[in-house]
Amino acid sequence: MKRIIIAVIIAVLASSAMLAQNRIHGCVRDESGEPLIGVSVVTQVDGKVVGVMTDADGNFSMDIQPGGAGLTFSS
């Protein structure tokens, strides 16, 4: 019985680790330090493209799976 309980605990912990996500956030600014509005921030994770746009202050935030590729910015 003790082995079954330990196995279940390990399975739950392993599955929750696989579902974990990372939050990436930042601010996109031009050379003079002014925030850039409406810039697309895109990354590709396991063949799936994930993207957001910057807000009125140049800020963005996105959730990605661990192991994602680098970010790409475009206006």
Image: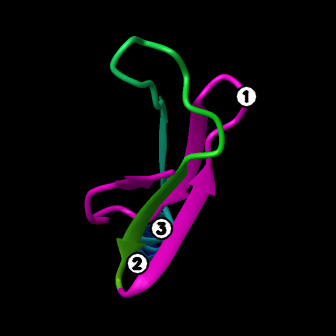
Which residue corresponds to the image point at 44% horizontal and 77% vertical from the top-left? 11
Residue 58 in the image: x percent, y percent?
A: 59, 29
Q: Which residues are magenta?
A: 47-75
Residue located beneath label 2 in the image = 7
Task: Estimate how packed mark 2 is, as few (under 14), some (14 to 19) or many (20 or more) residues with alpha carbons within 10 Å.
Answer: few
The mark tally for this picture is: 3
Residue type, mark 1 in image: Ala
Q: Are marks 3 and 2 in contact (CB under 8 Å)?
A: yes
Amino acid carrying label 3: it is: Ile
Residue at horizontal 38 percent and vertical 73 percent from the top: 44
- Contact (CB < 8 A) between labels 1 and 3? no
User: Which of the 4 quarters of the picture holds residue 60?
Assistant: top right
| Dot 3 alpha-carbon crowd within 10 angstroms: few under 14, some 14 to 19, many 20 or more | few
Does 48 lie within the magenta span?
yes
Q: Is residue 21 above or below residue 36?
A: below
Which residue is identified by label 3? Answer: 9
